Image (cartoon, grey):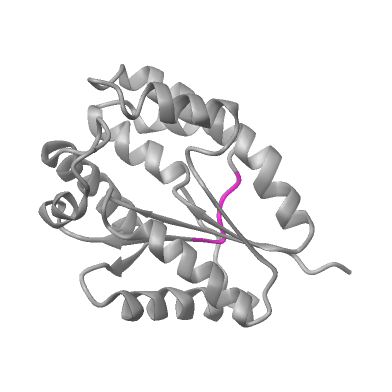
Amino acid sequence: MKEKGFFVCIEGLDGCGKTTQTRLLVEGLRRRHYNTVGTAEPSKGKIGRFIQKGFLHGEKRSSSVVEALLFAADRTEHVKREILPALEKGKQVVSDRYVYSSLAYQGATGLDLEWIRTLNKHAIIPDLALFIDVEPTTAIKRLKEKRSVMENLETQRKVRDVYLKFVASGGLLKIDGNGPKKDISKEILNAVLRLLENPSLRSLNHL
């Protein structure tokens, strides 16, 4: 019987270090002989590329409804094209952002979370969802001068509040993102290995 794959996503504010930690987690799992692939949202598909070029780096932010619809469409394609095929082959998949980003970023604008969940009903539930937590002021300082339309202090504060609600409800596991990069990486790797090596400890995650 083929071993079941494992899906983990890493969430956080822009500038929290999640892209670096996604890469380090993939490398750490590969060193331990886990067949691991890294991916990200927006994806590299047609819709994801459209989001990157036409929405994230425009002069001003688009309608949050349009954002939610586009990200949900990209996610559906992402799951079908990249995530599910890898999991069906027994691989470990690490995604830099997933459905929690839609809930946090579009939810922070006042959109109904249940409506966003409905849009994403075809998104599979990850085995583990991590939130790298840093203060919004810290995240903004880390960003380069060329920011996306969502990378401002007010937006990031609202987004963090939504993320922390998911932490409180058990949907996300919080990781302190303020320490040295290698310490954060070790904590994340240990959290993933704990579940990989002890499948009985896995609990049903939720959005």
Q: Tell how many labels.
A: 0
130 sits left or right of 29 in the view: left
- Which quadrant is home to the N terminus? bottom right
Q: Is residue 122 above or below residue 19?
A: above
Q: Position of residue 166 (x, y in %)?
A: 33, 52
Residue drawn at point x = 24 percent, y = 42 percent: 159
Q: Nearer the viewer, residue 76 or 140?
A: 140
Whether residue 115 is visible here, answered yes or no, is: no
151 sits left or right of 107 in the view: left
Q: Position of residue 198 (x, y in %)?
A: 61, 81
Q: Main secondary structure of the magenta part?
A: loop
Residue drawn at point x = 32 percent, y = 60 percent: 17
140 sits left or right of 185 in the view: left
Q: Is residue 202 above or below residue 60?
A: below
127 sits left or right of 55 in the view: right
Residue drawn at point x = 23 percent, y = 20 percent: 59
Q: Position of residue 124 (x, y in %)?
A: 60, 46
Residue drawn at point x = 18 percent, y = 42 percent: 145
Q: Nearer the viewer, residue 110 or 203?
A: 110
- Give the residue furthest to the right: 1
Toward which corner of the image does residue 115 lie, by quadrant? top left
- Asked if the stretch drawn in magenta spans residue 108, the answer is no
What span is in magenta?
A: 124-128
Whether residue 41 is visible here, answered yes or no, is: yes
Q: Nearer the viewer, residue 111 or 24?
A: 24
Q: Position of residue 40 (x, y in %)?
A: 51, 47
